[in-house]
Amino acid sequence: MEVFENIDFRTTDFEITEYSECNFIQCKWIDCDLSTVVFSECIFEDCELVNCKTYKSSFRDVSFDRCKLLGIPFYQCETLLLSMSFNHCNLELSNFFKLKLKKTKLTQCDLKQVDFSECDLSESQFLDCNLSGAIFDQTRLEKVDFRGSRNYSIDPAKNYLKKAKFSESEIRGLLQHLGIEIYS
């Protein structure tokens, strides 16, 4: 596995190519153009990807651990073989509009104001995530596990929720759209 460590790609050239089985550790891509880059079976650890362009980028079996991924337009990525997992990541303001992300695992992530509109997230896991301001509209959430996650607002009339799992303590995120008051 090729390792790239402590590289700031604002000051170092980033080759537009295919990266297969690479490990990126503490690297920074801030306002970088990642268009058409292919990442296949790569691991990103403690990296920063902020406001990057992703037109036709490919993320195939990629894991992000303890990364900052702010404002990333994932919806512009190549959808063929798209597969990612996120662990202890900050994905604020990122956009997954209309993507098929079945069985995606997001663990202890900050997902503030992330757009999941019209996504297929069937059988995914949102484990202990902060979903404050996250957008779910016409989103397929069949068998999604939200247990332990918080601050979500999901309208059951506008999303497909069959067999989704929620923590009892956070159930008001499903009921607030009904205009009812809940007291403990």
Image (cartoon, helix red, strand yellow):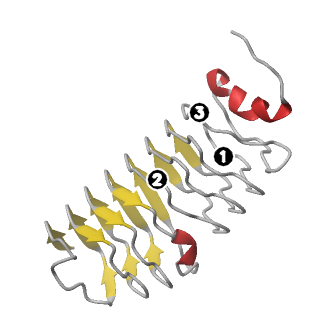
Image disc number at residue 144: 1
Q: CA distance from mark 3 to mark 2?
A: 20 Å
Q: Which residue is mark 3?
A: 147
- Front residue of 179 and 77: 179
In terms of sequence position, does the residue under pointer 3 or pointer 2 come before the other? 2
Tell me the residue at 50%/39% (across/down).
130
The picture quadrant where one finds residue 168 is: top right
Which quadrant: the C terminus?
top right
Drawn side of residue 61 relative to residue 175, left or right = left
Q: Residues within 10 Å of mark 1 (few under 14, many from 20)?
A: many
Q: Earlier in the sequence, mark 1 or mark 2?
A: 2
Three-letter code, disc 2: Glu
Looking at the rendered image, the quarter that the N terminus falls into is bottom left
Dot label at residue 92: 2
Residue at position x 69%, y 61% in the image: 120
Q: Position of residue 157 (x, y in %)?
A: 86, 45
Given the image, on which type of amino acid does mark 3 rest?
Arg
Judging depth in this view, the residue of 162 and 66 nearest the camera is 66
Please, is residue 12 above or below residue 163 in the view? Answer: below
Q: Is residue 173 above or below residue 106?
A: above
**Label 1, label 3: how far apart the Cα atoms are:** 9 Å
